[in-house]
Amino acid sequence: MSFIQIQNLAFSYGGLRVFENLSLEIEQGRFCGIAGPNGAGKSTLLELLAGHRKPSSGKIRIGGLSPAGGGFKRSISQLAAFVPQESTPVFGYTSYEIVMMARYFRSRRFFFEQEEDRKIVQEAMRQTFTEDLASRPITCLSGGERQRVYLARAIAQETPLLLLDEPLSHLDLKHQILIYEALKRLHREQKTILMATHDLNLAAQYCDWMILMGPGGRLFSGPVQEILTEENIGSIYGIECRVYTVEGMRFFVPKAAEGEGKRAEY
Amino acid sequence: MARNPFTIWVSFFGLLIGLMLAAVLLSGRGWLFGEAPVPSRPDSLRIVSLAPNLTEILFALGLQDKIVGVSSDSNFPPQAAQYKKVGSFWNPDVEAVLSVRPSLVVTLGFAQQANLAALLEKAGCQTLQVDIDTIDQLYGAIRKIGRATGSQESAERLIKEIADGLEAYRGRAADCGRKVLWVVQRQPLRAAGKNTYFTELLETAGAVNAVQSAVFQYPPLSEEQFLLTGADVIIETADSSDDWQRQKASAEIFYSRFKGIPAVEQGRICIVDSDLLCRLGPRLPLAMEAIVNCICSQKLEQGKPQ
Amino acid sequence: MITSRQLLKEIGFGVGGLAAVVLLCALIGSEPLSLEGIVKGRQPDAQIFFQVRLPRLMLAVLVGAALASSGAVFQVLLRNPLAEPYILGISSGAGLGVMLAVLAGFQWSWGELSAQSLFAFIGALATTALVWWIGGFTGRTGGPGMILAGVVVNVFFSAVIMLLTALAKAGQIQTTLFWLMGFLSSYTEMKIWVVSVFLAGAGFGILLWLSPQLNILSLGTAQARSLGVVPERLFPIAFIAASLLTSAAVSLSGLIGFVGLIVPHSVRLIFGPDHRRLLPMCALFGAMFLAIADTIARILIPQAQLPVGVITALAGGPFFLLLMIRQSKPVYGGGL
């Protein structure tokens, strides 16, 4: 039985139908990228997996549990950690306090954090390069710094599954690589990672599984080598692109729309 | 090193509750374990009055030596101003009342001051609550005060004085003008209704209250209703003599738009001292005099100052 | 980062400070008291100190603590740092209850507590239930949705109060106005204190126990759910506890405004938004604030006892402004 099972999932926002009849299976331990044009339902899928929304029909099971249901103890927080796309906090907790919130339901004591919690938080912040942000209020951070803090929080939650909704969109290239490296490390520790992303190239380098979601219910799911092809990308995004292989790594370049303008020669 | 949260909560709440209990114990000083011993009544009569008309009554009964505190709006007789002020009837200063160690507190109503009444009981002080909304109630109140202070004779004398004073004006306004209106408030327009002592005064004098509504004591009047009253005389009250001039002037302007009312057309708008008319007290005959003078005069005039 | 030892130390200091403030305020008043007279039990010094001032200050402590801590909780539940306990209609609901009690002329009283107090309590709780129901009914259960429902209820009930005011007698209007302005009286009866302390303590205890979850809830229901909080359970419980606290305070002392807004906001600016520290500090500072405000209300104009709500409004505004100016860049605050 796969770790994540989605069967006949249907979901609508009011009158807008997002999924019709989606079925998907993801094994444990996969580092899975989810890509597709805006509005295809990437964030929605992650939110359904995280239990933030209930499906109109169909079944979702993570490790045998339904994310939206569950009582107090066996809630989804033990299994899946969620890194939101963008979030403006109302109150100015420090980054340290924000990351520490992940430990509340995992800690042995309910009210005060323990030494072991402190260690875990520190390690999570080290992995995401947010240690120097520890005592700054989260409302005073840039969007990219905030995203890294949320990632640290997800790591500190010590869940087998990480759900990330475009966690790198505000980061500069250097930090994108650093975070990808951190995620790769987590992947090696047997964590399952589902990440919505717009960057196909970096996804191609780091992910081992790929889900492409497109308009009209189009869905491709499989190992990244198989899925990321010119035809699939053209089908999903509606644009043509070319694949190049450099030093064994593939990357995709979209074809210019009309007329081949000047291009830099390497 | 982190302690069990349970002990923390217990100690926190224990501290809080302990503090509370300590304060309650201290503030009660023994009534936790039964009634506090009731201090004996002070030997002499020490009276506090919480309303200006009650102060006037006490003075009229000759009890001024026994008074130890008056309400802040007690302004008559002038000597009253020298006594210790203990707040107003609506808002008595509890501490001031207690500090004069009264043996009798006379008040018009204590609904919202049950707390003060309870504290006074504990100090061995008697409270006397009277309602004075009609002239009969005024007499009744004077009798009650007389009984409580051992001056029943003075009380009867005062009652007779007031009654005679009012009798002296019986029928004096009968042929001067018929309908009288007492405007207590201009905006919104409110007048004294049928069930007030004002009507009693008018009927004694031989006049009639222009307002016949018996639903409200001081009914609000729309402009239409005001015109329909057909009042021959309009009476307003003012607080001090300086205000009279100003109020007279503004009254002319204000009422000038109600052209259909005889009072306005004939210029019969009077200002009466509010200390006389608004207080049901020993000076009621003077209020009666002012009203009758107003009704029977030919033009704008002030009520006689005291 | 809070350790139990650190928190207890801070609370200990706070309690000590509060006790000192209360004792000092009890010695200040319109009547000069002699310390010797108080200690020796001479009347009226002792009676004024123990039966008028101390109970009144203890009530200020209770009401101030209740309003400030419930204000902090409403701010996090509604995710709005400008929320306060009355925003959800409690003020007009309680006021309407009082007005109805006054107009109906109920003479019933439970010791020193009048019928108006009971009606205020019922009115306050009923109104929060109504606002909750409206929020659910219209499908707007989030923070802004509830605030909207609260505004609607407030406006409607205020209109009803105005209608009744136009029909009421002068004495009744005075009594209601008294209530609406907020007042502190000296309750000396044990039974009233026991019930009040129990209600307030229970409400506060529940909220304090929930404070780590309230921290998480401030991130929004989605993120809170991912972190293990069940918003469908937490929100109603915290909401009811905070409403209970507020209703108890309002029934004892009328509508004292600004304490539930200024104190939590200021305390958060100083101590941070972590509710494990914020709630006890709000309680302590709310208590101190109201005790001092009450003392000022008693002595500002000789022989006139100003309603304490006047002082909280006058003092609260400039104080808050000062705080905002001194913190040119808010350290803890955000969202404004």
Image (cartoon, coloured by chain):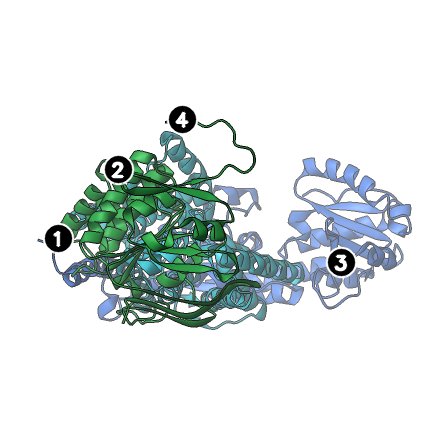
Chain colours: A green, B blue, C cyan
- Residue C200 — which label? none
Residue on which the image places disc 1: A116
Marks 4 and 3 sit apart, C-alpha to C-alpha, by 122 Å
Badge nearest the viewer, 4 or 3: 4
Callout 3: residue from which chain? B
- Which amino acid type corresponds to the residue marked 1 in the rendered image? Glu
Residue A33 drawn above or below residue C113: above
- Which amino acid type corresponds to the residue marked 3 in the rendered image? Ala
Q: Quadrant of residue B119?
A: bottom left
Q: Residue at x 29, y 45 (%)?
A: A205
Local SS, label 1: helix
Q: Residue at x 42, y 57 (%)?
A: C253
Residue on which the image places disc 2: A133
Q: Residue at x 36, y 41 (%)?
A: A251
Callout 2: residue from which chain? A
Quarter containing the C terminus of chain C: top left
Residue C22 visible from this viewpoint: no
* Total numbered circles: 4
Give the mark nearest the N terminus, 2 or 4: 2
Residue on which the image places disc 4: A265
Residue A241 visible from this viewpoint: yes
Residue on which the image places disc 3: B168
Badge nearest the viewer, 2 or 4: 4
Q: Residues within 10 Å of mark 2 (few under 14, many from 20)?
A: some
Asked whether the residues under marks 3 and 2 belong to the same chain, the reply is: no
Q: Nearer the viewer, residue A56 or C122?
A: A56
